[in-house]
Amino acid sequence: MTSPQQELLEQARQAAYKAYAPYSRFRVGAAVLAEGKVYAGVNVENASYGLALCAERAALAHARSHGAKIIEGVAVYCLDAAADASGAVPEDQTLPCGACRQWLAELAPDAWIVTNASPRPYGVADLLPRPFRLKA
Ligand code: THU
């Protein structure tokens, strides 16, 4: 049985092979499920290291660029996350960074979020309880 979360994770996994990560060698794919469609994104690095774009923000921008507004779920797949001694990938290597959490809070406030090492789907408020907002 495949769940919507597992299906979206598979889309994120496939996208991750397209990552441009020659500096970190840490390839990430993200997939956004919005209004019945899937929008993928990958991390895109730069020789000026601080300019790296995360996969989550690339995928969210992809969805918005196609007019999708209601985001149901986001999957993140870190292909190169290293397994620990027990053979499991530690979850913290796969969770969205702080900047991506802020983007999720604004663009996907009601989405579930899964990663290739998360034990269960998270809500945005689980990851960023008190996001910055301009309006109350
Ligand atoms: N990265 C992501 O794509 N998403 C995250 O949430 C964390 C980090 C990327 C940025 C960089 O290209 C590489 O992973 C290593 O930090």
Image: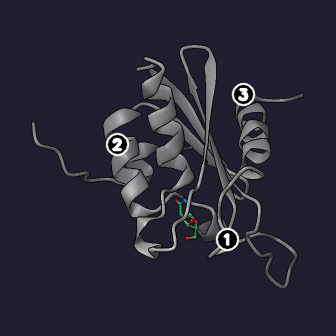
Q: Amino acid at mark 3?
A: Pro
Is 68 on the left or on the right of 9, as rendered? Answer: left
Which of discs 3 and 1 lies nearer the camera? The answer is 1
Is 11 on the left or on the right of 21, as rendered? Answer: right
Disc 1 within 8 angstroms of ligand 1 (CB): no
Identify the colour scheme used: one colour
Is 20 on the left or on the right of 67, as rendered? Answer: right
Quadrant the C terminus occupies: top left
Q: Disc 3 vs disc 1: Cβ atoms closer than 8 Å?
A: no
Q: Secondary structure at mark 1?
A: loop
Work out whether mark 2 precedes mark 3 in sequence or the reverse, and give the earlier one.
Answer: 3
- Checking the image for residue 4, the label placed there is 3
Q: Secondary structure at mark 2?
A: helix
What residue lies at 48% left-to-right and 64% top-to-bottom?
52
Is 67 on the left or on the right of 135, as rendered? Answer: right
Q: Amino acid at mark 2?
A: Ala
Q: Amino acid at mark 1?
A: Pro
Q: Disc 2 vs disc 3: Cβ atoms closer than 8 Å?
A: no
Q: CA distance from mark 3 to mark 1?
A: 31 Å
The image shows residue 57 at horizontal and vertical percentages of 46, 46
Foreground of the two, 85 or 29? 29
- Checking the image for residue 22, the label placed there is 1
Q: Secondary structure at mark 3?
A: helix
- Checking the image for residue 105, the label placed there is 2
What residue lies at 77% left-to-right and 47% top-to-bottom?
13
Foreground of the two, 124 or 24? 24
Residue at the front extreme, as displayed: 47
Work out whether mark 3 precedes mark 1 in sequence or the reverse, and give the earlier one.
Answer: 3
Disc 3 within 8 angstroms of ligand 1 (CB): no
Q: CA distance from mark 2 to mark 3?
A: 21 Å
